Every structure is written in structure tokens, then in C-alpha cells.
Image: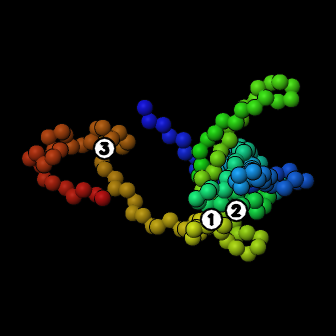
Amino acid sequence: MANLNKVMLIGRVMSAADRPPTESRSFANGGKVTKFRIAVNFMNAKKNPTTGAWEGGESAFIDVEAFNREHGRQLADLTEKLTRLQQIFFEGRLRMNEWTDKDGQKRSKLLIVADNIEFLDKREDGGESAGGGGARPMRSAAAPARKPAPSYPSNDGGNFDEHESGPSDVGGGGGQEEDIPF
């Protein structure tokens, strides 16, 4: 049985107004982890034209951990410099964090361990990306112009199963061949 544990998200770094957006911790072996929270919109908010307020948006708040790799990218160092509301793209994997709270209750939380991060906003220090290894920020590009899809005649104007030609016309069986429209 195959397994896949892969997450790819774009979100904004979140924090309380009185707290920094990231929290870093160093280990005795020289390792480091930076924790932060992102908000991912799964229903776009719309601006109310009369009040000017944003309405109707829903977000999921997700905890993320980024580690410095011994032979790889130093993601903890990169994410340590994140700013509140900065937009990032990251890839990672899900991990279940389990602990016992001070009242003796078992608790658990699903979080994401980042494997790759790209900053999508310009950073405050003037840089555009901190992805390392030549990573560039993503930019949206205009979609290329496309030809409209061909239309085919049908008996009732909308049922593809009831095309005017019968099964004998398929595969060049006695009928004239048409160009394939792609």
C-alpha cells in the first residue's frame, strides 16, 4: 500500500499584535527549529462596496515548523526573519504533535514540517526572496490566449451521448474522415 504525505500551501504569516510572528529554539547538538503560524484562505473574502469592510472570508490557521538541515537548507534561519502578514509558499509534510498538558490531559495537534519555503512578498530589507539556492519569488503571469473549444452538433443541444452520427461513422468505417480538433 502506497503512502503520500505532502502539503503545498500559500498563506500569510500570522501572530498576535503584541507577539513576534516566529519563535525559534536552538538544540544542544547545534540544530534549530523555528515555529510560526499561517492563515490559509479557503473561501475568498469580498469587499463590501458600501462599508469598505472585507466580508465572507474563511481561513484555516496552521502551525508550521522549519528546521535547519545538516546537509541542506537552513529553513529555521530563513523563517526566523518572517514578518506578520508576509505571504509565503511552502511545501512540507503533516506531523501529529502529542503531549500531556499541566492538568494531565492528553492533547494532540496536527502541524506541518516545512521542506521548502519561498517568500512571495518583497521583504522589508529590500530582498525579494529568501528561498536560497537561487529560488525566485513567484509572480502571476497573464494567461495565454486560448482558442475556444470546438462545438459539435447534437440532437438536443446538450447531450454528448446522442451525437448526430451513429456508431458506424466512428473510426472511418465508411464515412468521411474529419480532422481531430486539437
Q: Is residue 111 above or below residue 15?
A: above
Q: Nearer the viewer, mark 1 or mark 3?
A: 1
- Outermost residue, top direction? 104
What amino acid does circle 1 point to?
Gly
Instruction: State which quadrant residue 159 falls in.
Output: top left
Mark linked to residue 155:
none
Q: Residue at x 71, y 55 (%)?
A: 30
What amino acid does circle 3 point to?
Ser
Mark linked to residue 131:
1
Task: Report crowding for label 2: few under 14, some 14 to 19, many 20 or more residues within 10 A (C-alpha).
Answer: many
Instruction: Find residue 93 and report its horizontal and vertical position in percent.
Output: 59, 45
Instruction: State which quadrant residue 107 falls in.
Output: top right
Instruction: Find residue 120 and report its horizontal and vertical position in percent.
Output: 65, 64
- The residue labelled by disc 3 is 154
Q: Depth check: 30 or 143 in front?
A: 30
Q: Nearer the viewer, mark 2 or mark 3?
A: 2
Task: Report crowding for label 1: few under 14, some 14 to 19, many 20 or more residues within 10 A (C-alpha).
Answer: many
Q: Is residue 59 visible?
A: no
- Outermost residue, front direction? 29
- The residue labelled by disc 2 is 78
